[in-house]
Image (cartoon, rainbow, N blue to C red):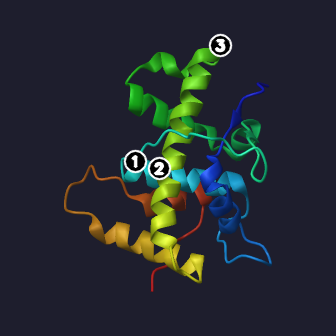
Amino acid sequence: MSAHRIRVAKDKAELVQALVASNDTTGLFNTYVDVLLFAAALGAKRKKRVPLGAISQREPAPIPQEQFLVRGYDIVIKLLAIVETQDRKILSSSHYESEQKRNSIFEEYVNGGLEELRDELRGSVDYSETILLILNSEKFKRNSVEDDFDLTRFLEIIFSVKVRYF
C-alpha cells in the first residue's frame, strides 16, 4: 500500500468538520472521506477546480488514500484524472508521479466543491436540508441534453441510497 494521502485546504478544514455528523454539528456525512467525495463530485459537476494553498495538518489531517480504496471511492479519483487529462497513462499504479497527479486533481476538485458548499451553506442552520436543496436544484437545472452529469444519480450509486426530494 502506498503512503499517499489526500489533503484538505486549511481554510476549508472547519467546513469539512462541520459536514461530518456528530452531536455538535448538523452534518450529513459519516466520515471525512464521504465529505471529500461529495465535494469532488460537486466540484466536477460545476467545473470548479481550485489549487489547495495551505494544507490542514490537524482535523482533518491528510487522509490515507487507503480509506478511499476500501470504500471503493478510488474509482472516482481515477475517473476525474482520466477525464481531466485525457491520458490513460495517468491510471498507472506503478508510477509515483501518476498517483500524485491523480490525487492532486482530486484534491483540487474537492477544494472547488468545498468552496461551492461554503457559499451555499453560508447562514444555514441545518446543513442536511440545505444539501438536499442543492441536490434538488442540480437535478432541475438539467436541460434536455442527455450527456449532462446527474450528481444525484451519481451519489445514489456511490452511497447506494435513494435521495428523496420534498
Q: Which residue is mark 2?
A: 112
Q: Give the mark nearer the N terminus: 1 vs 2.
A: 1
Residue 82 is situated, as x and y percent measured from the top left of the image, at 44, 29
Q: Residue at x 65, y 13 (%)?
A: 94
Label annotation for residue 26: none
Q: Quadrant of the C terminus?
A: bottom left
Q: Could you tell whether 53 is left or right of 57 in the image?
A: left
Three-letter amino acid code at the position of disc 1: Lys
The local crowd at label 1, few if under 14, some if 14 to 19, many if 20 or more residues have their Cα within 10 Å, is: some
Q: Which residue is mark 3?
A: 94
Alpha-carbon span between mark 1 and mark 3: 29 Å
Q: Could you tell whether 64 is left or right of 146 in the image?
A: right
Of tags 3 and 2, the one toward the viewer is: 2
Q: In the orientation shown, which residue stands out farthest toward the left?
A: 144
The local crowd at label 3, few if under 14, some if 14 to 19, many if 20 or more residues have their Cα within 10 Å, is: few
Labels 1 and 2 touching (C-beta < 8 A): yes
Q: Give the mark nearer the N terminus: 3 vs 2.
A: 3
The foreground one among 127 and 29 is 127
Alpha-carbon span between mark 3 and mark 2: 28 Å
Three-letter amino acid code at the position of disc 2: Gly
Q: Give the mark nearer the N terminus: 1 vs 3.
A: 1
The foreground one among 151 and 11 is 11
Q: Which residue is mark 1?
A: 48
Residue 85 is situated, as x and y percent measured from the top left of the image, at 40, 25
